[in-house]
Amino acid sequence: MATELCDAGQLWGNRMTQSNDLTRQRHWEKMADESIDKFSTSLWRCFCDQLYLRFLNEWTGDRRFRAALKTDLFDEVVGDGLAEWLLSASDRVEGIDLVSTIAQQAARRHPGLVARQADVRCLDAYPVDHFDLVVSNSTLDHFADASDLAVAIAELSRVLMPNGLLFIALDNPQNPIVNVRNRCSSSSEGNSQLIPYFMGHTVSQAELCRMVETTGLIVERSDHLMHVPRVLFLHASKIFSPELRSGQALLGLMHAFEVLNYLPTRFLTGHYSAVLARKPN
């Protein structure tokens, strides 16, 4: 009888998980169908891309990669994203997104990118030791359950080649603004005008390093990034174009805030935590 109750409880838990996953997927599909234009703010996207590229160029150096994987292709649809850099640094680049239309649009915008619909928690399409670079920026912080984050990191570690590099960036919960925003997102299920998309569970930089090391990877670099007052400059960037001198001036001012990363308070001002890890031979 106890076994039957246990099995029933597990079955109910699995059904609830599947239902939640389906709800989340429909949420992102709706975002893709209705809200792409809202997030296509060229100057802000330019700033985000440049910020990530600065870290990737510094942390990976001039290394050439055989095969790279980009998780979440939303940035490659609403802006330039990182696809072109990956294509220039790798012999082959693949990308995944939970929403098939996002994957298709990203592939059209970036010839050479092989894109497919997939869940980062289950990369069955890829064998063990398949990529020598995996870039996952702001992908793993949209899960409702903390355990999903660990599962996704384990999957990314599995498909990484020996001596391959894994770059992860997550929302920084130690930033008070990010913390409040994510709590509001959880309560509104991403359906409010203020926070139109769901922000999930995230962890501190120290916890992210620990989770990555649990999979057997070696953390080589870690840092915080995006110290600019996000809400203020996100709205300001809607007024200016990056092609204009005024837009370039605003872009320079936004980058100037990264000097805050040299202060002891960087863990409070950085919107994201970033980690670079290597799979040992």
Image: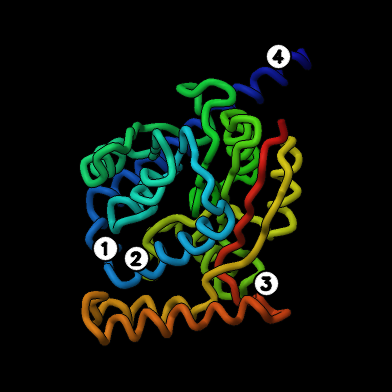
**Looking at the picture, how far across and down is residue 239, in whole percent?**
24, 81
Q: Is residue 85 left or right of residue 163?
A: left
Q: Which residue is mark 4?
A: 4
Q: Which residue is mark 3?
A: 267
Mark 4 → mark 3, Cα distance in angstroms: 48 Å
Between discs 4 and 2, the one toward the N terminus: 4
**Looking at the picture, how far across and down is residue 248, in whole percent?**
31, 81
Query: Which secondary structure lies at badge 1?
Result: loop
Amino acid type of the residue that numbered disc 3 sits on in the rendered structure: Phe
Count the numbered circles shown: 4
Query: Which secondary structure lies at badge 3?
Result: helix
Q: Are marks 3 and 1 in contact (CB under 8 Å)?
A: no
Q: Which residue is mark 2?
A: 45
Q: Which residue is mark 1?
A: 40
Give the foreground label among 2 and 1. 2
Mark 1 → mark 4, Cα distance in angstroms: 52 Å
Give the foreground label among 1 and 4. 1
**Looking at the picture, how far across and down is residue 217, in whole percent?**
71, 39
Between discs 4 and 3, the one toward the N terminus: 4
